[in-house]
Amino acid sequence: MQTYDFIIVGSGSAGSVVAERLSASGRYSVLVLEAGGTDRRFYVQMPLGYGKTFFDPAVNWNYKAEPDPGLSNNADHWPRGKLLGGSSSVNAMVFIRGAREDFDAWAAAGNPGWSYDDLLPAFKALEDNEAGADQWRGVGGPLHITDCSNAVHPLTKRYLAAAQQAGLPFNPDFNGASQEGVGVYQITTRNGRRMSTARAFLRPAMKRGNVRVETNALATKILFEGKRAVGVEYQLNGERKIVRAGREVILSGGSINSPQLLQLSGVGPSALLGGLDIPVVHANDNVGANLQDHVGVNYTFKGKLPTLNQILRPWWGKLLVGMQYILLRSGPLSLSMNNAGGFFRTDPSMARPNMQLYFQAFSTVIPKSGERPILTPDPWPGFSIGLSNCRPSSRGEIMIRSSNPRDYPRITANAYSTNADVDEMLAAVKFVRKIAAMPAMAEIIEEEVLPGPSITSDADLIQDFRKRSGTVYHPVSTCRMGPDAARAVVDPRLRVHGLEGLRVIDASIFPDNITGNTNAASILTGWKGAELVLEDQK
């Protein structure tokens, strides 16, 4: 039986970073177990190709949440990356760190070392920002971040002008001094190709002799001797395999897979485990609980000016942008669908924004079977202004259904299950309409397509956003960090409470959700988590 110093389960946004950092000195041997396969696929590397990976079982877990009363009983599609790079290989690439107050609140809750000032040096060290270095930004790090200011669709300028006419300031950098305002999103690409954590961190690490990566390796159980994690059981090509960890087992499976593997291994709510005849290694009701996610909705308009629809829909347009991408690595296919966005407060008395905006210079009202129709938009000039909540108070859970590791867990999102979440979304969608009514946008809008001008009363607006909202793919907190073992899964050093030799390092440890897209903070968690592991080696 082989032994490695560290076994990392998952090669995603955090796991790839952990693998690179732990192997850098050459002192430790590292095994990475990835349930999916390679990231070397055209539609993974092409930024706008994630429309094709959105339902592709070759690279996507394709989870489905339970029918949700808060979403008019819709069963939401929950894509998660199942390949090297994890969800950083299939996401929309927007790079948002989160607000200073988010991380300061983590530290204030009893997690020393996790304040914004503590984390800023790590954020700067991991990035190579095309916009240049300043007191907030870093250059020269492994993760290249593209400044899209000069590449966005011309309609984006009208959106930015309308949002400013509606009262929001222009913000040149959402990761700078403040988040509030509107601006162009920076994205994780380099030279027109996606900059996943596999590309930035894992592939350089794989060139080292002390790193081994097993793909198509599904971790099925953490192995314990008493209360100490000593290895991992996994399936590879139908075979059961066992590998030992000389120092630590590190779970980086993300907010769905990490609590699932803990529960399968006997770490979780005792009633759940007992009901499934799983022997309890360590009882903790927080494993899989405290699920938080951002929920969003789009308002879609028919325009009087051409949008990306007129380029991306016809065959000749596809050929044109395809040639532009293949020859020059530029054009619409080299960008995210979210050209711009912003952050605003639904109540001026709030200390920080609670809503995020997204602007898309195309529309996808007409569905296309089997894919997210980014590359086959509507046949008329359309565009969307989307929004999502930043710190909702609704809480859900992720719990296994059986002791079979191949059975998907039960995802109960409980979206809009609090009055506060409903009230702030109601205020937010009204603000989207305010932006659309400003001169810079109103003069080029022919009509509102969704939800449409007939939806005006509060009751109808609420019914509409319940019916049309869905996850924006930012689940966190299912293995939350905290000093109190009665309320958390891991301690501030990401060690699982009550056990030895076992950590969780991914977005599931967030004590609370952050203001904005979660990928940057997931990558940061991998960087910070690896630092903690290295500090604790004797």
Image (cartoon, rainbow, N blue to C red):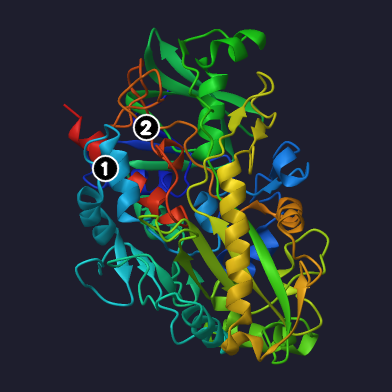
The quadrant in which residue 272 appears is top right
- First in sequence, mark 2 or 1: give its number: 1
Q: Residue at x 57, y 89 (%)?
A: 440
Q: Nearer the viewer, residue 14 or 447?
A: 447
> Is residue 82 among what the camera can see?
no
- Mark 2 vs 1: CB contact within 8 A: yes
Q: Residue at x 65, y 44 (%)?
A: 61
Assign a secondary structure to mark 1: loop
Is residue 521 depicted above or below 65 in this figure? below
At label 2, counting other C-alpha atoms closer than 10 Å, the crowd grade (few under 14, some 14-19, many 20 or more) is many
State the separation of the CA atoms marked 2 and 1: 11 Å
Q: Residue at x 46, y 61 (%)?
A: 345
Residue 4 in percent (x, y) is at 35, 29
Q: Nearer the viewer, residue 423 or 301?
A: 423
Assign a secondary structure to mark 2: loop
**Would residue 114 be found to the left or right of residue 64 on screen?**
left
At label 1, counting other C-alpha atoms closer than 10 Å, the crowd grade (few under 14, some 14-19, many 20 or more) is many
Q: Nearer the viewer, residue 525 or 420?
A: 420
Residue 199 in percent (x, y) is at 43, 60
Give amino acid for label 2.
Answer: Met
The residue tagged 1 is 114
The residue tagged 2 is 481
Furthest toward the left, the residue is 538
The quadrant of the image that shows the N terminus is top left
